[in-house]
Amino acid sequence: MITKIPGSNTEHYKWGNGCEGWHLLKTDSLNMIKERMPPGTSEQLHYHVYAQQVFYILSGKATFELDGELIDVNKDESLVIPKGVKHKVANEEKEDLIFLLISEPRAQNDRMNLLFKIKSGQHLR
């Protein structure tokens, strides 16, 4: 079935400190979400047991922590995170971070939050 998805009329949710997302595609095998993170926000360190994820940056710059390493991802760049990799995304800039998050299979109910922060000795660009 072919479906056109209007960006302003999708399932919307809020998370963290002013962050929000819009479900563009939500199936058991594939999920695509447009997310917005205001300046100075971050998610909790976590990993996924089954899902791999692709983050595609639409605007701003994302700083990812991946198994203790920091990686900056800029507008029009993407980052693939395999299942099992401890990660989090942060917006350390002065403008909103907007990105597409694609998960395969669907990442809901697959997230394992971690209660500690991995220290990083190297910031990769």
Image (spheres, grey):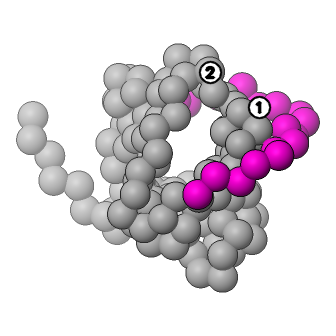
Q: Residue under label 1, please give it.
A: 113
Q: Can residue 106 be seen in this view?
A: no
- Identify the amino acid type marked 2: Gly
As drawn, the residue found furthest toward the right would be 116
The residue under the point 46% across, 45% down is: 79
Say few, some or many: other residues with alpha carbon within 10 Å of mark 2 (under 14 / 14 to 19 / 20 or more): some
Distance CA(mark 2)–CA(mark 1): 12 Å
Q: Quarter of the image for the C terminus: give it.
A: bottom right
Above/below status of 107 relative to 66: above
Check the image and report above or below for 68 versus 33. above
Please report the bounds of the magenta region as a residue range: 106-125
Residue found at the very far top of the displayed protein: 50
Q: Which of marks 2 and 1 is nearer the N terminus?
A: 2
Above or below, comparing residue 93 to residue 55 in the picture? below
Residue for point 14% across, 46% down: 3
In this figure, which residue is indicated by the disc labeled 2?
A: 84
Q: Would you say 111 lies left or right of 80 here?
A: right
